[in-house]
Amino acid sequence: DAMVIQNPRYQVTQFGKPVTLSCSQTLNHNVMYWYQQKSSQAPKLLFHYYDKDFNNEADTPDNFQSRRPNTSFCFLDIRSPGLGDAAMYLCATSGLKRNQPQHFGDGTRLSIL
Amino acid sequence: AQSVTQLDSQVPVFEEAPVELRCNYSSSVSVYLFWYVQYPNQGLQLLLKYLSGSTLVKGINGFEAEFNKSQTSFHLRKPSVHISDTAEYFCAVTPNSGNTPLVFGKGTRLSVIA
């Protein structure tokens, strides 16, 4: 089945230690998204790629960066995680047309010690 | 800009009873509307979408939603819920043109009681 896969499902890192979350897709979608979701809240868009065109949300902290080396893979880098960055991180993909829904991975739950 | 209001943060309902989860949106342009479900420790899964045409939209797991343009609403309904429907439900909207990303409501926690 075509899908969006996030690794790892659970990640523990130390305060201030860089961490990378990964996302891969077999849907061949042009658009990839990264969301942050805290407990009992809606997903908050951090950034997205239209193909290689990177779009950063205005309120995404500089501490968060992303890379998309090819169509299938996308990475979220947190340079110096703080306690407030503990959350579920969701990757999603979609086609280019606005009427196409987003397909989500199962997320990576990040804990900060 | 678009916004979404989910009027109920939590909805408890007995098994086999009907349920309605309310969603209102605000937009100055035409929109596409979506409902997603999120089970614990999982990502979001599309339940249904309204793009155009018939205002009554049927989705997976027996859910349906009705688009009401005059009331700017897109309420989700199911005639008989199961324990397995316990989850978080998100309404989302995006304009049908431009670059504005999908805007989510804050979610409604549906708890089905045996």
Image (cartoon, coloured by chain):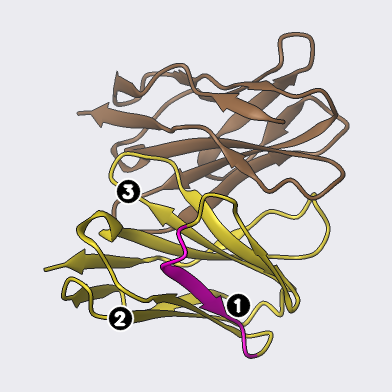
Sequence-first disc among 2 and 3: 2
* Visual hue assigned to chain A: yellow
Q: Looking at numbered disc 1 in the image, what kind of residue is underneath it?
A: Ala
Could you tell me which residue is drawn at 61 percent across and 40 percent down? B103
Q: Residue A113 lies in what quarter of the image?
A: bottom left
The answer for how far apart the CA atoms under marks 1 and 3 are is 27 Å
Q: Which mark is nearer the camera, 1 or 2?
A: 2
Query: Same subunit under labels 1 and 3?
Result: yes
Q: Colour of chain B?
A: brown
Membership of A65 in magenta stretch: yes
Expressed as whole percent of the image width and height from the top left, the position of residue A7 reads: 37, 81
Q: Is residue A48 left or right of residue B109?
A: right
Q: Which residues are magenta?
A: A61-69
Type of residue at label 2? Pro
Counting labels gives 3
Tell me the element at label 2: loop
Give the amino acid type for the residue marked by disc 3 in the picture: Lys
